[in-house]
Image (cartoon, grey):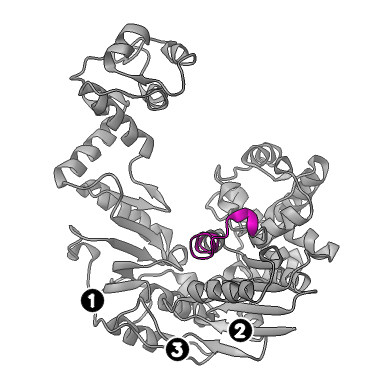
Amino acid sequence: MIEKLILGPPGCGKTHTLINIVKEQLQDGVNPERIAFVSFSKKSIEEARLRASSVLDLPTDKVPWFRTLHSIGFKWLGMKAEEVITRYDFNKLGLQLGMVFDNGTASSMTDGLLPVSAREGNKYLELIGRAKLRKVTLEQQYNESGNYDISWPMLVKVDEIYTEYKSENMKYDFTDMISLFVKQGTAPSLDVLIVDEAQDLTPLQWDQVDVLKQSVEKVWYAGDDDQAVHRWMGVDVGLFMNACDEVEVLDQSYRVPNSAHALAQRVVSRIADRHEKRWRPTDREGSVTYHRHWYDVNIDRGSWTIMARTNKIIQDVAESLRQAGYYFERNGRPSIDPMLLKGIETWETLADDISVSISAVRDLYKLVPKRGENAVVKWGSSKTLEGVEEDAMLTYEDLVRNHGMLASKDTDPMSIVNMSPEEQRYMTLILKRGEDISKPRIRLSTIHAMKGGEDDNVILFTESAYPCVESKFPDDEHRIFYTGITRTKENLHIIESGAKYRYEL
């Protein structure tokens, strides 16, 4: 077996390199169905599938093993969709345990990571999952966590009931998919294995990789130990650094300008345990500017990402942006519900005497008020749309005549879609600013969530929190802020707040 470690510093074209490896293997006669491209990250796999399709003309069905690690377990073990634990299951568990789980619990496990939330129930599940990913006992995980807000007897109870519930109902979470795959010990017949974002794998996930590579001839592990930011999730970056002896460093960044590169090098040099690597910035100078407050930065034009160490900081920024009438997205969600924007667009089209599709009308009718003095359509009018041909185009007059439309054409579109007074005020401010509502140009994110991303202009907060700054793992903070600094393509703005706990750049 040939094994190789590919170190990809920020913006050095790691995914491009990996897709070229796939291309070379295909040219050598390897069947694409015997090539596995795996990662813990759904984002990484989606990008790999897109590149394979566009560059190599390989649709998804031709590369069945381009999958997340938990998805490989799901497919190989022959699991069914109804066996995956859902939000409904967590609601039932919450009632049984007398605690609340975040409603987004199931969906938040997309990457096979732990369900992170401020909700009490999620905190218990996080510890349980982390113990399994680290391959340690629950007691050891509890003692090492230092989270004494969590009751040990209750943690044991949650673990027992959660395990019992899954067993009785034949339900599996993403960690179970990996554990069962490892326990079974068999894998698809493969010739080539590529492990992307390998610096962020937990001991249990590395066990899965070991099972996957049993019959493999060539293995590539790709990642960057300097960007290993998930130790708190059970990640052991040492397993990546010692994966094999042959190491290749990608040494040219196509993202990071010279000014940000210089700052990044100062930060990364503080990491005690790392692969020494040299990489070159782009030929752009870019800029690094320091500010006392984030609102001192002019964000009225261009593409921006605002990053912080904690969600609390991001929440405060989000509230300020709303008050000022900026349109933005957070965690991939625009600050105004896209359905509302679509409904407004549909109504404005109808009011201009232009026909719209039946599907657009149905979506509009889901939003509009149907009772009281503000009713836009008669109660029950949605049912009149059920028998309409799917390719039908309807006008405002059609809706008045046949589908219970009550509102006049001059009715404010924001009232049509039943926006709250607060939402209407916010929408008015956005329009007054002249913001393009087709796509937010401002993005809010934690540094963790922006890993792998980039933007022309980046605002980075140095403010942190006591558990982070005073951690017994100082390399964690160095890696996190190194990752944050290297998201910029042009201009980096550092916010040096007067907060008690902050990272010193």
Bounds of the magenta segment? 47-62
**First in sequence: mark 2 or mark 3?**
2
Q: Position of residue 322 (x, y in %)?
A: 26, 47
Residue at the disc numbered 2: 5
Q: Quadrant of residue 141?
A: bottom right
Along the viewing direction, whichever of 142 and 264 lies nearer the viewer: 264
Q: Quadrant of residue 501?
A: bottom left
Disc ID at residue 218: none
Q: Position of residue 213 (x, y in %)?
A: 75, 74
103 over 320 or under it: above or below:
above
Tell me the amino acid under the disc marked 2: Leu
SS label for mark 2: strand
Residue at the disc numbered 1: 290
Visible residue check, residue 367: yes
**Tag 1: Cα neighbours inside 10 Å, few (<14), some, or many (≥20)?**
some
**Tag 3: Cα neighbours inside 10 Å, few (<14), some, or many (≥20)?**
some
Along the viewing direction, whichever of 117 and 147 lies nearer the viewer: 117
Residue 183 placement, left or right of 317: right
Q: Residue at x 27, y 35 (%)?
A: 422
SS label for mark 3: loop
Q: Residue at x 59, y 89 (%)?
A: 247
| Magenta span: chief secondary structure | helix
Tell me the amino acid under the disc marked 1: Tyr
Of badges 2 and 3, nearer the viewer stands 2
Residue at the disc numbered 3: 270
482 over 338 or under it: above or below:
below
Q: Position of residue 174 (x, y in %)?
A: 68, 55
